Image (cartoon, coloured by chain):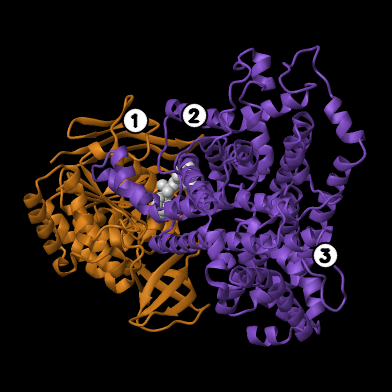
Amino acid sequence: MLRALSGDQPRWLVALILSLILLLSLTPSLRLMVEALSQLELGSESPLARVLRDGATWQAAYHSLYTSGLATLIALVLGALFACALSLTNVSGRQWLVFCFMLPMMIPPQVTALSWLQLFGPSSPLLNSLGIAPALGSSQPLYSAEGIALLMGIQHAPLVFLTLRSSLINMPAELIEAARINGASQRRVWLDVIFPLCRSGLVAAAAIAFVSALGNFGIPAMLGIPASYYVLPTLIYQHMAGFGQSMLSDVAVLSMLIGVLALIGVLVQQRFVRRAQYELLGHTGRAQAFVLDSRHRLLLQLLLWTVLALILVAPLIALIISSLVPALGVALDSDTFTLSAYVEMLTRQGSTARAFGNSLLLASGAALFLMCLSLPLGWMMSRMSVRARTSLNSLIEIPYALPGVVLAIACILLFAQPLPVIEVSLYGSLAIIFIAYLARFMSIALKPVQASAGQLDGSLEEAAQLAGAGPLRRLVQIVLPLVAPALFAGGLLVFLTAVNELTVSALLWSAGNETLGVLVFNLDEGGDSVLAAAISVVIVLMVVALMLLLSLMGRWLPQGVIPWRT
Amino acid sequence: MANLILDNVSKYFGDQPAVDRLNLAIEPGEFVALLGPSGCGKTTMLRMLAGFETITGGSIRLGGQLLAGEGVHLPPEQRRMGMVFQSYALWPHMSVAQNVGYPLKMQKLADSERKRRIGEALEAVQLTHLADRAPKELSGGQRQRVALARCLVTEPDVVLLDEPLANLDRHLRASMEEAFREFHRRTGATMIYVTHDQAEAMSLASRIAVMNAGRLEQWSTPQALYTFPRSEWVAGFIGQGGVAPVHGVSAGMELGEEALLKGLSCDVGAATPVLIRPQDVRVSERGIAVDVAESIYRGERYELKLRLASGAELMAYHHQPLQAGQRAAVQISRGWSLESAR
Ligand SMILES: Nc1ncnc2c1ncn2[C@@H]1O[C@H](COP(=O)(O)OP(=O)(O)OP(=O)(O)O)[C@@H](O)[C@H]1O
Ligand SMILES: [Mg+2]
């Protein structure tokens, strides 16, 4: 039956979709590799040798490893605390805890960096308002490797949380109870049962946090560049600012270097995720192994909310206060309170409005396009053999798993010359960002549709087929209504991610084509932090609103589509 | 060895009682089954004994020591109990020997002593040759035996078993039942065995506590449970048979042929439900008139459903089929009068 159905899909549609995926997923990486490995015949003068000889490369690589390693540790501590507390104990208010803990992942990194910058240093409006700001001239502690690591750790902790939680939730409570009744104290249970059983999950979580930190551009750009502390992505950004003959080949080599590091991380992660699932196979999971009495429960809740207050609420308050003062360094009181930054943002024509327009256009365009693509693609894939589906999924995953800089550089290389035949140049237009977004976010849009289409009973379609409906009619009249919530959720997730995107657009933007992410970054670099803060407040509000909207849709969606839903 | 006393034990989830004022006095070394339909609170009761759940009211004592109640809650690791889980609960990251040796490690036994005891326990369940295997390389029955050995190794006073055979096929069940009996003989531990399978409870336990909706319905030996069920509910739950209203008798009486004949045909005074087992009903020429409602072939004999004049249904066995709708007569040699259903 399945074979009959898959044979019945129109060939032109299958061919169109497959070639589109190949074009979007594979060509950029291939083009990058070709460039990075070009002119090898020049020997020690080839781009590869030249970049590898350069001390700055190795220093940036070391910085990348150091900050990402430290960030991974921080993310592990935070993520493990929340994953254990929320999946093994009976704390209450889980939904809000999860929502708030996931928020840092959805807030764009440059906004995170900006809000933390408002929290520390001599010109912090918050500290000034409280009268505890350090003396003028003292340094901003966040402009350091450790500052970068701290913020990246907080931003990527939700990834650790999600990975670890899935292995904890699947851990059968009986295994813990069996240890208790055999004489193990609570402490021994952690040591002897829980830790060994979620070790693979921990490794997988560490790997994904590390890869994400490696590719993070916004935070090291905002915190590192002022202190001349370069990591690989910011080094590429730095190189791009210079011109010169060999610049593109050099950044291609650097990109490949990050790409290889990230790939290793991704492979480690996939291996251990699979092992974590395998180890607990055959057991039925049940959460809540530790039922705390009311006093301990309150203490734990207090701890969790205190952590959230420190990593989320405090910087956001600092950000809001910064957006309400006339200039940095001014304390907020009834005299200095002003909404001028917001007024300026709304009324000033030019870059602000344009950036909002561009980002909304790009994000909604990418969301719509990917929704249209995901519907037939998810439908096709649910009818494929497991092997074909797995390979196609890995292909689609490439541009998403690789750091954004890598994709951006690859797109520059791909579109630096005018397109063949039609002789149109995409470089320096919004179109290049749009194409990069399509490649990068395809996986986000597709996953919910796949989950939903996978749950559909094949007989629904077979019944329609017997009634005489052709494949396209079935797709629109049977499949579409059933997967619509997932399709829409995927679109919203793409919109949410794309509208704040910085890494790709930071390298691909050109005058007149700024995005919202680039705008915040440029304003802060140009010293206009108050306006940047006001825009960031709006961005955070938008993120929260979209996340709440997705939460509300949650009950029509298969499990796992919305990460922060418990 | 110590006796286990449950005094008015209750457990509420919210305002829903899962266990309602349960009283049991269990002798040392007894093999007790907790029997009841799904959702009646058996698992909850067992988990309160183990210390995984706090109790809402009452108390639990083991050999005079207060385990739970009156503001005390001894954690599971201090109760000297063992437990066999339905899912076996073997730790997948430890070998068979490590699984079995874990409780001894918790007791901080010396290495050599530990090795000896692990060896003994594995021998008792005939798994010595599999000591270094991982649990996932074992069959279901072998896993359950490892779980038994892990329980055996510390010689606990009380062993709790929650439907330990529910995951096994019929053939394996029989051999595992034998393993439990052997375990009981060997250790002399008090065993509390939760099940919803009455055949299992009857064949293993020396006394059975029948539970319904959180309450104790009856607490007696398997034989007494079958022959002298207290209430109409227990009679319907245990074994087969029919219940007929009989006039002029009171609850808790054994009735002979005469009394039944008289009581069934008369209709003055209050009626009491009487349990009539199929082996006590004999189709004959004369006797009580019945309609044949159904006749089902069961291999060794036919099972008859007979309807009395009062509308009550009886069950009987017969060597040949009868036509549905046909009239017949039966003689009933024994009945047992019950308390009406609440
Ligand atoms: N943690 C809990 N929270 C709320 N209600 C519970 C909880 N655990 C059990 N219950 C309820 O208590 C009642 C008794 O449950 P229990 O698991 O003890 O039944 P059981 O007799 O073991 O049933 P089964 O034979 O199906 O295993 C049920 O109605 C159940 O829904
Ligand atoms: Mg149960």
Q: Quadrant of residue A155?
A: top right
Q: Position of residue A53 (x, y in %)?
A: 51, 59
Q: Which residue is mark 2?
A: A303
Residue A426: mark in rendering? 3
Who's orange, chain-wise?
B
Q: Residue at x 68, y 41 (%)?
A: A110
- The three-letter amino acid code for the residue at tag 3 is Leu
Give the chain letter at badge 3. A
Mark 3 residue CB less than 8 A from any atom of ligand 1: no
Query: Mark 3 against mark 2, which lies toward the viewer?
Result: 3
Marks 1 and 3: CB-CB under 8 Å? no
Marks 3 and 2: CB-CB under 8 Å? no
Location of the N terminus of chain A by quadrant is bottom right
B69 left or right of A283 in image: left
B253 left or right of A502 in image: left
Please identify which colour was used for chain A in the image: purple
Mark 1 residue CB less than 8 A from any atom of ligand 1: no
